[in-house]
Structures are given as C-alpha cells and as structure tokens.
C-alpha cells in the first residue's frame, strides 16, 4: 500500500489492493498494479478479489491506468497474495486497517471468491 506520507496515497483509491510485479528497474523503483473497484463491481468487494485482479493484470502486463512505477520509500508492504491459494497473508495489519478503513482484519476478506 502507499505510505501515508506519499503522494500516491492521494492518487490511489483508499482500500485498493496493490501488487508488486517483479521488475528490473536500475533505479530500484517498483512496478505496481492496483485495483480499487472504481466501478462498484460486486465481484471486487473483497480485498483478496482485488488482489487477484491486480495480480492478473500485472502478470499479463495488461495496459491499464491502474499501474505505476513507485519508489520503495513510497510503499509499505503489508502482506502478500498467493495466486495458487487465492488468498492474502497479512504481515503488517496496522497500516492495512487504516488504509482499508477496517476496525479488524476479517479473515473472509483475505480469501478470493469467484
């Protein structure tokens, strides 16, 4: 997720899932795809579903405005998404709670449903 002090936290919709795609930028920046459900799609309500869509776009190098090259200092890693399990593992819940506006992490949010 974007660091609260980063300008990206104002550009990317709060609660969006951000997925880093492996890249070889010499300046150390990260290629990130994100999904914020701007269209209100009912399949993208769960956080894990947003992660899935962002990851699929990134792995396919899909052309989208929902991607950016971001400096590591502008990002906070809060977990990772497992494509095979279609599930999120949260490693740092505090910033994720604030980013998503949650009081607690609901385990159902972390498993994709399709």
Image (cartoon, rainbow, N blue to C red):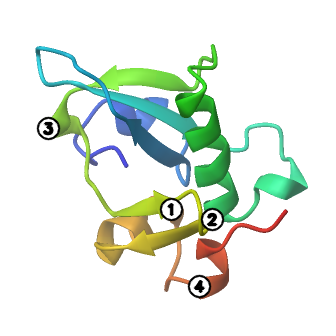
- Labels in figure, total: 4
Measure the C-alpha gap from mark 1 to mark 2.
6 Å
Q: Nearer the viewer, residue 61 or 7?
A: 61
* Foreground residue among 23 and 31: 23
Q: Please tell me whether mark 2 sits on a helix, a strand or a loop.
A: loop
Answer with mark 4 or mark 1, whichever residue precedes in sequence.
1
Image position, residue 14 (x, y; %): 52, 49
N-terminal of the pair, mark 2 or mark 4, is 2
Residue position marked by numbered label 1 in the rendering: 82
Q: Position of residue 30 (x, y in %)?
A: 27, 29
- Secondary structure at badge 3 equals helix
Q: Is residue 98 left or right of residue 86?
A: left
Pick whichever of labels 3 and 4 is earlier in the sequence.
3
Residue at x 55% of width, y 48% of height: 16
Tell me how far mark 3 sits from mark 1, CA to CA: 24 Å
The residue positioned 52% from the left and 63% from the top of the image is: 100
Q: Dividing the picture into quarters, in which one does residue 111 lie?
A: bottom right
Query: For mark 4, what is the residue?
Result: 106
Which numbered mark, 2 or 4, is in the foreground of this view?
2
* The quadrant where residue 31 appears: top left
Q: Are marks 2 and 3 in contact (CB under 8 Å)?
A: no
Dot label at residue 73: 3
Up the image or down, 95 lies above or below 25; here it is below
- The residue tagged 2 is 86
Q: From mark 4 to mark 1, how far is it between C-alphas? A: 17 Å
36 or 108, nearer to the observer: 108
Contact, CB < 8 Å: mark 1 with mark 2? yes
Provide the secondary structure element on which disc 1 rests.
strand
- Separation of marks 2 and 4 at Cα, in angstroms: 16 Å
- Side of 4 relative to 72 (left or right): right
Tell me where residue 51 appears, x and y as whole percent.
58, 52
Q: Is residue 10 above or below residue 51?
A: above
């Amino acid at each position: 997720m974007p660091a609260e002090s980063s300008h990206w936290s104002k550009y990317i919709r709060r609660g969006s899932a951000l997925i880093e795609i492996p890249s070889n930028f010499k300046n150390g920046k990260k290629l990130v795809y994100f999904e914020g459900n701007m269209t209100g799609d009912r399949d993208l309500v769960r956080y894990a579903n947003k992660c899935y869509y962002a990851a699929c776009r990134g792995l396919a190098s899909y052309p989208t405005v929902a991607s950016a090259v971001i400096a590591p200092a502008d990002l906070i890693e809060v977990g990772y998404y497992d494509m095979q399990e279609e599930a999120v593992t949260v490693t740092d819940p505090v910033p994720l709670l604030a980013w998503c506006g949650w009081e607690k992490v609901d385990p159902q949010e972390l498993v994709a449903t399709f």
